[in-house]
Amino acid sequence: MKKKLHANNFDLTKVPFDLYTDENIFQEEYDSIFRGPSWSFLGMESQLKVDGAYFTTEVTNIPVVVVRSPSGVRAFVNRCIHRGSLLCLEPEGVLSEFSCVYHGWTYGLDGALTGVAFERGINGDGGMPESFDKSTHHLEELRLTNYKGLIFGTFSKEAPDFSAFLGPEISPRLDRVLHKKPVLLGKATQVMHNNWKLYVENTRDSYHASILHTFFTTFKLNRLTQSGGLMISETGANHISYSRRGKSDNHDGYNKQNLRANLDDFRLSDPSLLNFLDEFNDGISLQILTIFPTTVVHQINNSLAVRQVIPRSESKTDVIWWYYGFEGDSDAISSLRQKQINLVGPAGFISMEDGAVGAFVQKNAPHSSHNDAIVCMGGDDYKSSSSRVSEAAIRGFWSQYYDMMPPMN
Ligand code: FES
Ligand SMILES: [Fe+2]
């Protein structure tokens, strides 16, 4: 076992608060995780319909452009190799070559440097030296996986194959919500005033969901008393939490806890918001799937989205919600998906509170230097279980995190 960041992190049930606040740790994560052997979600193939179609995105603060070229989908750091200017300035479009605004250098869709303005100077005066060979220069390229229409990239040659990284427990669950070709419906960005790991932990925290989110509990979309479970990959890196509406839901469990989340006398004027079409034919109405480090894919009733977590600094994070449906969706399911986009996102009935609690923790974290967060609900390991009253998936995250980060004091 590799040495850990903190001695007490041999114990996965404790998380030192300075992991959320230390700028040096954020820098180390940049080098060891985001530029290291991990896969980051970049976008959807459905955005790239023709050769030359591109979109820009980011992996933490590294700008990236993803383009369909005649040799397939490719991704490059969105940065000119001459003096480092941003290359593509628009969020998306179609182009025949990349052209830098600063000094006009051009690149093919394969990233090869094709043109240097005034390369030979004027009338042989000035210009690049004879020894400068364009063919040896290329945009920095990422390794890509196109997983059933979702595009993931890594900067590392050492990153394991994406499917192997997902593991046999999780890949069928990702396939489940990609059973047809995914089509992007729209995007929204949620700004979080907290460290990225607080949000990623939150998405693995099945314990909080029906306690913090009054909408979930009041309208019985997700309760810990419903049948479901947690599945965690062998490495701890990836997980799903899932539940079925209506099965074995003993509402007394909530009444006895006297929780603020249980607002029995609230009604919706348009209850069709809560409709559920069992499109995957398994009765599962909620599945939250996480892929280390920063990808979440959710199904909440018929709302489907990939959440791309973009760490900005040790205390700022953007979450981009990529709402999707499937090619060939019926009108009925399309309109239900659109309606249920209201459940999640920056102003979502469910997810607003996650932004608030992340900021509450971040604000207090610097004042807790001698304390660790406690994550021992459900044991001290990260095994799959039928109970979601558990923090096992959070412990799985930390196990993978410590494996990827170098030793520190
Ligand atoms: S920085 Fe791009 S051409 Fe000079
Ligand atoms: Fe939440």
Image: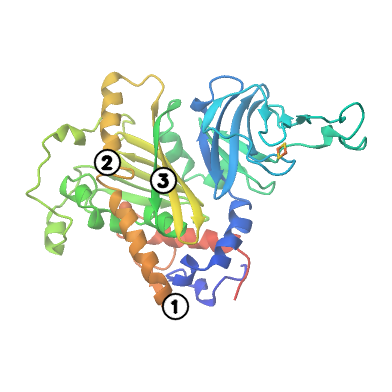
- Earlier along the polypeptide chain: callout 1 or callout 2? 2
On the question of residue 237 being in view, the answer is: no
Residue at 78% x, 30% y: name it. Answer: 117
Mark 3 vs 1, N-terminal side: 3
Q: List x then y, in percent, for residue 190.
A: 38, 46
Looking at numbered disc 3 in the image, what kind of residue is underneath it? Leu
Q: Percent x, y for residue 245?
A: 22, 42
Q: Amino acid at mark 2?
A: Leu
Is residue 123 or residue 145 the one in the foreground?
A: 123
- Horizontal placement of 394 versus 168: left or right? left
Q: Which residue is mark 3?
A: 289
Residue at which label 2 appears: 343
What separation in Å lies between label 1 and label 2 (alpha carbons)?
Answer: 36 Å
| Disc 2 Cβ-to-ligand 2 distance below 8 Å | no
Q: Residue furthest bottom?
A: 370
Please state, as top left, top right, bottom left or bottom right, where the C terminus lies in the image. bottom right
Q: Which residue is mark 1?
A: 369
Q: Residues within 10 Å of mark 2 (few under 14, many from 20)?
A: many
